[in-house]
Amino acid sequence: MRDSRNIIPVSMAILLHVGLFGSMIVAFEYSRPTPFTPLAIQATLVEEIPENAPPPPVVVPEPEPEPEPVIEAPEPEPDNSEELRRQAEEEKRQLDALLEQQRLEKLKKQEEERKQKAEEEAERKKREEAELERKRVEAEKKREEEVRRQREENERLRRELEAEQRQAEIDAEARRFEARNSAEMAAYQFAIAQRIRRNWSVPASAGPETRCTVHVTQLPGGDVVGVNISSCNGDEAVVRSVEAAIRRSSPLPQPSNPDLFDRNLTLNLTLEREN
């Protein structure tokens, strides 16, 4: 494309110089004087030369015109379009390479920044998780320590309570043991037996030697909650009559001394008939 553009101006310049050179040659030919040829006349000229006549003038020949300088056509400029094209392509290639390098460096920098941020975020999360785990472990240790301490305290209180209960039972049993041999105990048992006898409807099948051993369970206050006849030499009617008499006697009389109270009583009932 550039070659076709250079050829036209060069051709026009050559034609212009050729035209100028031709015009100068034609002008030079027309400017030269035409030689004059005189007519030949034979005559004899007699001239008197004065003695003091001035010398004839010296005829100076006209200088011949200098030849017109030959204007040579300028040499055509060398065609460097290919070199310019290669240079432009090289410059473009270098520019593209520079832009590509800058783009790659920018991408590399962005990737490094992204990796750095990701590493920092991962490190931050790792620290947070480690802190949460540390707090969880501490809380778990504290909870286990509190549970252990509470268990130990509960065990201590339980042992103390059991010891107190055992001691109270021992003291109560000792008091009951002492009271059983006392007159108060005899009066307490007699009062219970008398109430049961008053409520005993003795059947006709009972003989004068009827004897029954009965285990009675009572609540504080004397309410009977259980009757178990362990032995009796009477028939079934006698056994039923004894159990009914004990239940009709509820609540049983209470002792004057609270230490004499016993939830589980063992009563020996004998039949006493009026004569």
Image (cartoon, helix red, strand yellow):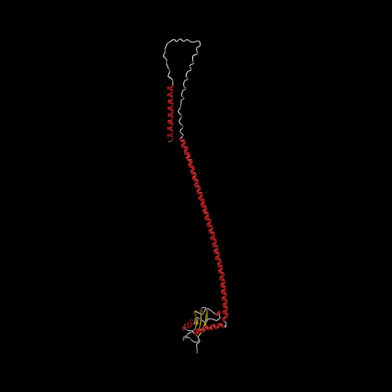
Q: Quadrant of residue 28?
A: top left
Give coordinates of residue 269: x percent, y percent: 51, 84
Give coordinates of residue 184: x percent, y percent: 56, 82
The vertical placement of 150 against 19, above or below, is: below
Q: Nearer the viewer, residue 27 or 248?
A: 27
What is the number of callouts on the image? 0
The vertical placement of 92 against 246, above or below, is: above
Give coordinates of residue 167: x percent, y percent: 57, 75
Q: Quadrant of residue 76?
A: top left
Give coordinates of residue 81: x percent, y percent: 45, 35
In this picture, residue 10 sits left or right of residue 164: left
Instruction: Return the residue found at the far bottom.
Output: 275
In this picture, residue 179 sits left or right of residue 201: right
Q: Nearer the viewer, residue 275 or 149?
A: 149
The vertical placement of 65 against 257, above or below, is: above
Q: Nearer the viewer, residue 82 or 245?
A: 82
Position of the N terminus, as image quadrant, is top left
